[in-house]
Image: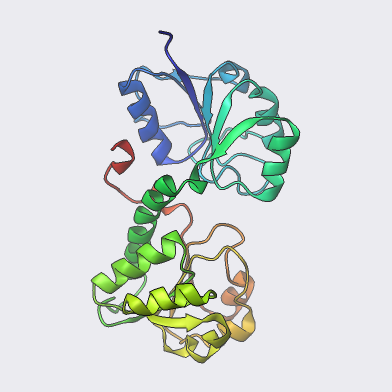
Amino acid sequence: MSIISIAIVGGDLRFVRLAKILCDKGFDTWVYGITHPDLPKNVHLATSLEDISKCQYIVGPIPFTRDGKNLFTPLSNTSISVEMFMENVKDSFLCLSVLKKDMIKLLEERNLRYKDLLSMDEVAVLNAIPTAEGAIQYAMENSEITLNDSKCLVLGFGRCGKILAQKLHGIGARVYVEARKTLDLAFIASYDYVPVPLDELKKHLWKFDFIFNTIPVPFLDPSYIDLFKKEAVYIELASTPGGIDIPYCEQTGVHYVPAPSLPGIIKVHNFYNH
């Protein structure tokens, strides 16, 4: 039986750990666009995309791209354009993440085989756990008050919003959750959080010590931001472009905390290996 070949291209610390897992399991493992002292000794260090073009599987970073032009390579000075990447991986199965419509269109126009890993619930839910824990860590580091008995607003009730609300509730915060769907609002109430319909959000914004956003759509314009408490801490968990008017935050002195890609930053147990 031939050994399966897997290449990892770009990515954060999670992908360094993934390289070790794959090497330990006996896969023919390559990396490109990652420089880190913890990379295993027996991993193959590719010097170009051509080196990995024959690998059966290629794992891309989370997110695949932030600017729509280059892959996300925070651990390397190597710039890898989306166009060059797609030109060199025609024979591989691509395991990618956080694919927007324009990227999906490019992949399908080239008849490339791919899967968006974070579209899989079993991956996305586990990924949301360190995101939620990291958000709580950032909140504690950026405020002089305790989360216990504070008023926290979670914007969005997707995978990340659900887990974050549960963890905040568990440490004694008074949790409010914004959602659009009536079904989500019913679930929010059943979990003993305070449901906040989007069309009633402005009535509540003055209350909160911490605001956590998980919605990747800019909807918090100045008319919302002006209602924030002066001492409120806003933590942006959503992918680009996020949910808030950043220039207006800077102009008005809102305590804005960018917190992208938390699972690749904070220390987490290796449940990815379970």
* Residue at the image point whose x is 31% and y is 71% from the top: 168
**Taking 147 as reference, is 204 above or below it?**
below
Comparing 41 with 218, the one in front is 218
Q: What's the colour scheme?
A: rainbow
Quadrant occupied by the N terminus? top left
Q: Is residue 42 toward the left or the right of residue 87 in the image?
A: left
* Residue at the image point whose x is 67% and y is 43% from the top: 104
Q: Looking at the rendering, which quadrant does residue 250 occupy? A: bottom right
Residue 144, how many percent across, how many down?
30, 77
**Taking 123 as reference, is 78 above or below it?**
above
- The answer to whether residue 138 is visible is no
* Residue at the image point whose x is 57% and y is 81% from the top: 252
Quadrant occupied by the C terminus? top left
Comparing 60 with 111, the one in front is 111
- The answer to whether residue 97 is visible is yes
Residue 196, how many percent across, how many down?
47, 82
Comparing 183 with 180, the one in front is 183
Outermost residue toward the top in this view: 1
Outermost residue toward the right in this view: 109
**Taking 235 as reference, is 27 above or below it?**
above
Residue 212, how many percent across, how many down?
44, 70
**Taking 140 as reference, is 45 above or below it?**
above
Residue 150, how many percent across, how many down?
31, 82
